[in-house]
Amino acid sequence: MNHHPNDRASMNYGQHDNSWKNDEAYEPYRRRMVTKMKVMLLAKSNRNSGKSPDEQSPLFVENLTDMTTRLEQLLFNNAQTFEEYNDYSTLKQRMSDVAQYISTQRKLQRQRRLSRGESGESTSSSCSSNTNCSNTTTSSTGTR
């Protein structure tokens, strides 16, 4: 069955049927989302650093690409519908929510290690499809 992604997502709206995520027809939208996120983060970095896009190091751009790919995966896995995933008007807030969630998880991991007397930094984090990162708003200190 070959539906346009918008048609397919509309049929599943409100049913929380995640089978739409297995449809390869969404791949162009996902690539576009990664590009949009990368542009947003690069613009923010440029504003913060005062550098032009051409002045960014190749390593920075490579890391940015890896980060946006992982971030997109988290947003995709958390979305209940295609419309929710593909809503550019909420993208900045959803990205911020996921970043806050990841930061909170890292702080909690660090606190657990310290309480067990372990040391070292962990750069991995996860946000399973059963966890709604976009609704996580508190940090380990209880503040945002």
Image: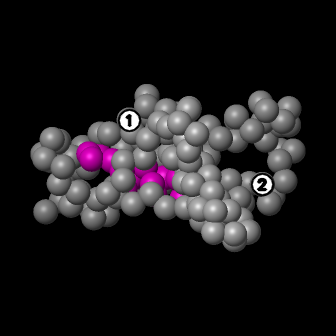
Q: Secondary structure at mark 2?
A: helix
Q: Position of residue 54 (x, y in %)?
A: 83, 44
Give me the C-alpha separation between circle 2 and circle 1. 27 Å
In this rendering, would 40 be left or right of 47? Answer: left
Q: Position of residue 31 (x, y in %)?
A: 48, 54
Q: Nearer the viewer, residue 127 or 44?
A: 127
Identify which residue is drawn at 77% across, 30% down.
47
Q: Amino acid at mark 1?
A: Asp
Identify which residue is drawn at 36% across, 44% down.
85
Please tell me whether residue 29 is drawn above or below residue 118 in the rendered image: above
Secondary structure mostly seen in the magenta stretch: helix
Q: Secondary structure at mark 1?
A: loop
Work out whether residue 65 can be spotted: no
Label 2: which residue?
Answer: 60
- Report the number of discs: 2
In this rendering, would 103 be left or right of 21? Answer: right
- Is residue 81 in the magenta section? yes
Q: Nearer the viewer, residue 39 or 138?
A: 138
In this rendering, would 15 be left or right of 42? Answer: left
Q: Residues within 10 Å of mark 1 (few under 14, many from 20)?
A: few
Magenta stretch: give its range. Answer: 67-82
Identify which residue is drawn at 60% across, 48% down.
103
Q: Nearer the viewer, residue 70 or 97?
A: 97
Identify which residue is drawn at 34% across, 58% down.
129
Q: Position of residue 38 (x, y in %)?
A: 61, 46
Q: Amino acid at mark 2?
A: Phe
User: Which of the labelled discs sits on residue 87, or is there none?
Assistant: 1
